[in-house]
Image: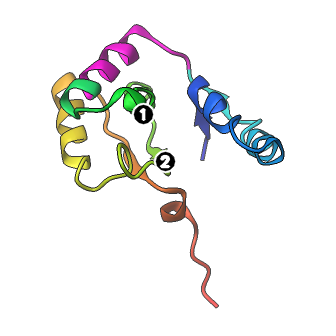
Amino acid sequence: MDEYVSEFVFAEISKGRPQQAEARLKAIADFSVLPMTDDIQKLAAIYVRKLALPKEGEVDALHLAMAAVHEIDFLISWNCKHIANAFKYPLIRRINVSAGYHSPTICTPLELMEVQDA
């Protein structure tokens, strides 16, 4: 599986305690960085409006738009308020379909962890 991040991920994971931030940055050091496009900005604006996201949710809209426009299979997020939220999934899918974009599976990191049988 190929791993991708956006420029916004670097800004987010650089926050907090320096030692933990360094560990997070190291964990994604080999991930490919997705480029920003006008289509991403336009789709993010639609998310902000139709999902009624607050100002602090604008970067969440950019994460969603990045994944949709670049046809990423899984969008992994700990943000259960704006992104990884079962109540938002159907609306996000409708927005993507009506705008002609792919709709990624949105999940938390725990949902992608492989379960090992004992």
Query: What colouring does the structure picture have?
Result: rainbow
Q: Is residue 69 magenta?
A: no
Using the image as rendered, state which of residue 105 and residue 41 is in the foreground: 41
Quadrant into which the C terminus falls:
bottom right
4 to 55, vertically: above or below: below
Q: Marks 2/1: CA distance? A: 9 Å
Residue 74 image offset from top left, x and y in percent: 45, 46
Residue ID at (22%, 24%):
49
Residue ID at (60%, 47%):
1
Packing grade of label 2 (10 A; few <14, some 14-19, many >=20) is some
Q: Is residue 46 magenta?
A: yes
Q: Mark 2 touching mark 1, by CB under 8 A?
A: yes
Residue position for label 2 = 77
Residue ID at (53%, 64%):
110
Q: Secondary structure at mark 2?
A: loop
Residue 36 image offset from top left, x and y in percent: 50, 15
Name the quadrant containing residue 11: top right
* Main SS category, magenta section: helix
The residue at the far bottom in this view is: 118
Q: Is residue 2 left or right of residue 105?
A: right
The residue range painted magenta reads: 35-47
**Residue 60: assigned label:** 1
Q: Is residue 56 left or right of residue 8?
A: left
